[in-house]
Image (tube, helix red, strand yellow):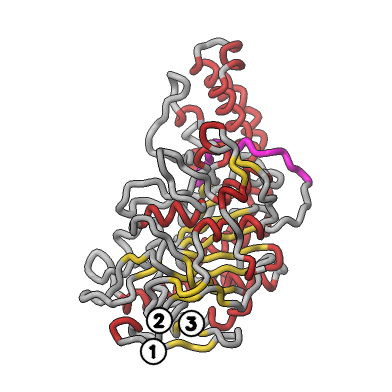
Amino acid sequence: MICLNAPRPASLCGSGSRRDFLHAGSIATLGLTLPDYLRAQEASGNKDSDVNCIMLFLLGGPSHIDTWDMKPKAPAEIRGPFQPIKTSAPGIEISEIFPKMAKHADKYSLIRSVYHTATAVHDTGHQMMQTGRLFSGGIEHPHIGSSLGYLKGGRGELPAHVLLPRPMGRTGGNLPHGQTAGYLGKNHDPFVLNADPSVPNFKVPDLLPPDYISAQRAERRQKLRDAVDGSFESFEKNAAAKQLDDNFNLAYRLMSSPKARDAFAIEKEPDAVRDRYGRTRFGQCCLMARRLIEAGVRFVTVNMFETVFDEITWDIHGSKPFTDIQEMSKLVAPNFDQAYSALLEELTERGLLKNTIVTAMGEFGRTPKVNPAGGRDHHPGVWTILMGGGPIQGGRVIGESDELGYAPKSRPITSGEVAATIFRGLGLDPHKDLPGPQGRPIPLAEYSLQPIKELF
């Protein structure tokens, strides 16, 4: 991902810098990031009604037993401190710490048998759940949203895939997190807001007017040519320079677009709507996701947290610098409960849920047995994710874990099957090829196994 306000310069074809190229005095102050992928397809006037997706990534790994797969008959050291409550879907119960989402269980399904067998670190789970595969041999697979963008492109001036609010940061493993386009190339990286829409008086600054763009484009283009080697002919023949030049022009086109400006203008929302989602970073990012989908963005990824350090997250080991089960229930769970419920409500009210998949997932579950610090540790053996919207049916439970929540008891589901389900829900042809590493085409069907047919 390439940030307009990146703190470090990057070399541009041997001389000059990306900061010079992007004109730091104006563009870099926007609070947005602009990956190279903005060489999106021209799609002006495209009024298609394809299915979209919002992926809420619950970084840290929610405890399945304390949230959506409770074990009330298990021993006390397993079942934890919370009681199950009934939901709007017959026969489905979830934890009492989610009273709002209990009222919307008809809009989502619980997949209670997701698992993986890779190392129990955050980064591997991030990779597998967002791409469908574990990275190996230096090969980074593309995020699901980037695959969608590669196959369908964006709509009009808007990027196909937007990531809010920032990319994942340090989570202890020092491995890629699966939030780029990988071998598809940076042209298909997500567009990143790189700002917190919950801060007081947040506003994406007014984007550059067309007159300014016209006046500055020639100067910027000439400086880029000079950075190559001073030769117009060399500039035109240099593939890397041409890509940057194309991206530069498309960046300006995006920033001059009233539709793009309006999509990010969360300050236009009434206070009552903003309060409905909660004035938290996650709540306001969920509201921003709704605005982006409504404007025409195909895929939005929301990171509930950016790291497992220095803040209370789903990573409830108990001992410092982490939190325990009780603190999670007081801060993290209410934040999610309010924002997720508001998102489902608003998408329904605006007629968007029928063509918008909403999935909420973490990278693994937590150990069934509560540890001596009052928390639970990493456990990829089984956990629960949420999926609904678009063609994916709500009010269902798919799979089950065993009596103590250690492993799948029925219908074990892999990350590849989760990816395949989203691909199918988005209407992607399983026989479509991604270019793959080393030029070897990879059909989506091979890449992501089979979808969870019970959800359709």
Element carrying mark 1: loop
Residue 293 in percent (x, y) is at 65, 58
Distance in Å between CA atoms under marks 2 and 1: 8 Å
Q: Are marks 2 and 1 in contact (CB under 8 Å)?
A: yes
Element carrying mark 3: strand
- The secondary structure that dominates the magenta segment is loop
Q: Are marks 2 and 3 in contact (CB under 8 Å)?
A: no
Examine the image and state in which quarter residue 215 appears: top right
Specify whether residue 31 is painted magenta.
Answer: yes
State which tag comes first along the sequence, 2 or 3: 3
Q: Tell me, for residue 403, which label it has, or none.
A: 2
Per the rendered image, the range of residues in magenta is 30-45
> Which amino acid, mark 3?
Ile
**Mark 1, residue position:** 73
Q: Residues within 10 Å of mark 3 (few under 14, many from 20)?
A: many
Q: Is residue 178 visible?
A: yes
Residue 227 in percent (x, y) is at 49, 18
Q: Residue at x 65, y 46 (%)?
A: 158
State which tag comes first along the sequence, 2 or 1: 1
Specify whether residue 444 is painted magenta.
Answer: no
Examine the image and state in which quarter residue 185 appears: top right
Q: Quadrant of the C terminus?
A: bottom right
> Which amino acid, mark 2?
Glu
Residue 24 in percent (x, y) is at 47, 34
Image position of 141 with respect to 289: above or below: above
Distance in Å between CA atoms under marks 1 and 3: 14 Å
**Mark 3, residue position:** 94
Q: Nearer the viewer, mark 1 or mark 3?
A: 1
